[in-house]
């Protein structure tokens, strides 16, 4: 058999009293504070987008600028989804507040009217009810703010997409200008028409992205106008190609005729000397 001897030391009444007093003080001092992590997440995401956007100003090639804008667009897409989540979470938080529908409506729309009593328009409530109204108002406003920010973010995304397309338009227009300059000093229709063939591709690229910009704003009139302009420009290129061939042919005929005239003149001179 194993014998275990032990003693239990009970706290004295004085020790118990001090312990209870200490716990009571701790409970009284402890307060609760709400931390909004949703707001923190949104602010961090916006800050990251701002950093990427700031880097854009120091980029000078179309490729690097395009990559930067695409990164901004991808990050903005995530921000839009975060705003959608925030809108729903804040709305749910507001709906959980124990408050009469009439007061919720007052928070949502306010109250005003010539025949409404002043005590109803500028009302006084007890502390608990006032706290509930303020709590509902806080989360209702945050939900609506998230909704508005989502709309703003969608506009910013569209602007970035337009800027991205405009990069391609500007690049294509620059290529057209360079090709035109080379064509103007080219000799022979084959070389000239080679530059016109390149211009056709650059022209199609330019109008392709101009049309994409019109689609972003759902401007169907502008879209149709651009499509008609492209068709007209392409026809003009084909006409110019034919004219280059015709001009080159005429030049060759003129050269042959000039050489023929020169030859005839020489023959006449020879014949005259023979006589």
Image: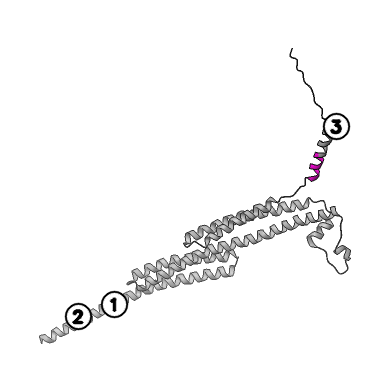
Q: Residue at x 54, y 71 (%)?
A: 225
Q: Is residue 238 magenta?
A: no
Contact? badges 1 and 3 (CB < 8 Å): no
Q: Nearer the viewer, residue 64 or 105?
A: 64
* Circle 1 Cα neighbour tier, 10 Å, few/some/many (<14 / 14–19 / ≥20): few
Mark linked to residue 123: none
Instruction: Provide the residue span drawn in magenta.
Output: 22-30
Q: CA distance from mark 2 to mark 1?
A: 15 Å
Q: Nearer the viewer, residue 160 or 121?
A: 121
Q: CA distance from mark 2 to mark 3?
A: 140 Å
Q: CA distance from mark 1 to mark 3?
A: 128 Å
* Circle 3 Cα neighbour tier, 10 Å, few/some/many (<14 / 14–19 / ≥20): few
Q: Residue 143 occupies which quadrant of the picture?
A: bottom right
Identify the element where label 3 is drawn. helix
Q: Nearer the viewer, residue 84 or 199?
A: 84
Which quadrant does the N terminus fall into? top right
- Judge left or right: residue 162 versus residue 201: right
Q: Which residue is mark 3?
A: 13
Could you tell me residue 163's position as x and y percent? Answer: 54, 64
Q: Decide whether the magenta segment is chiefly helix, strand or loop.
A: helix
Q: Which residue is mark 1?
A: 253
Q: Earlier in the sequence, mark 1 or mark 3?
A: 3
Identify the element where label 1 is drawn. helix
Identify the element where label 2 is drawn. helix
Relative to 157, does residue 12 appear above or below in the rendering? above
Q: Is residue 27 magenta?
A: yes
Relative to 128, does residue 224 appear above or below in the rendering? below
Q: Which residue is mark 2?
A: 263
């Amino acid at each position: 058999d194993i014998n275990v001897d032990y003693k239990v030391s009970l706290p004295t009444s004085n020790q118990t009293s001090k312990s209870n007093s200490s716990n009571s003080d701790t409970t009284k001092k402890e307060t609760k504070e709400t931390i909004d992590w949703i707001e923190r997440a949104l602010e961090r995401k916006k800050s990251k987008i701002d950093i990427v956007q700031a880097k854009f100003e120091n980029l000078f090639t179309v490729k690097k600028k395009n990559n930067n804008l695409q990164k901004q667009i991808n990050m903005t897409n995530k921000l839009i989804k975060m705003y959608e989540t925030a809108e729903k979470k804040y709305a749910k938080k507001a709906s959980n507040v124990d408050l009469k529908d009439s007061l919720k409506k007052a928070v949502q729309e306010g109250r005003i009217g010539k025949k409404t009593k002043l005590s109803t328009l500028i009302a006084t409530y007890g502390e608990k009810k006032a706290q509930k109204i303020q709590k509902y108002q806080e989360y209702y406003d945050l939900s609506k703010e998230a909704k508005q920010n989502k709309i703003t973010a969608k506009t910013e995304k569209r602007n970035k997409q337009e800027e991205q397309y405009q990069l391609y338009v500007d690049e294509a227009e620059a290529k057209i200008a360079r090709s035109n300059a080379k064509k103007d000093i080219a000799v022979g229709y084959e070389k000239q028409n080679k530059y016109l063939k390149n211009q056709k591709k650059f022209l199609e690229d330019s109008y392709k992205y101009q049309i994409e910009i019109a689609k972003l704003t759902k401007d169907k009139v502008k879209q149709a106008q651009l499509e008609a302009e492209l068709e007209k420009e392409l026809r003009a290129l084909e006409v110019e190609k034919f004219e280059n061939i015709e001009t080159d042919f005429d030049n060759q005929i003129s050269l042959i005729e000039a050489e023929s005239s020169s030859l005839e003149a020489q023959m006449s001179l020879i014949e005259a000397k023979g006589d």
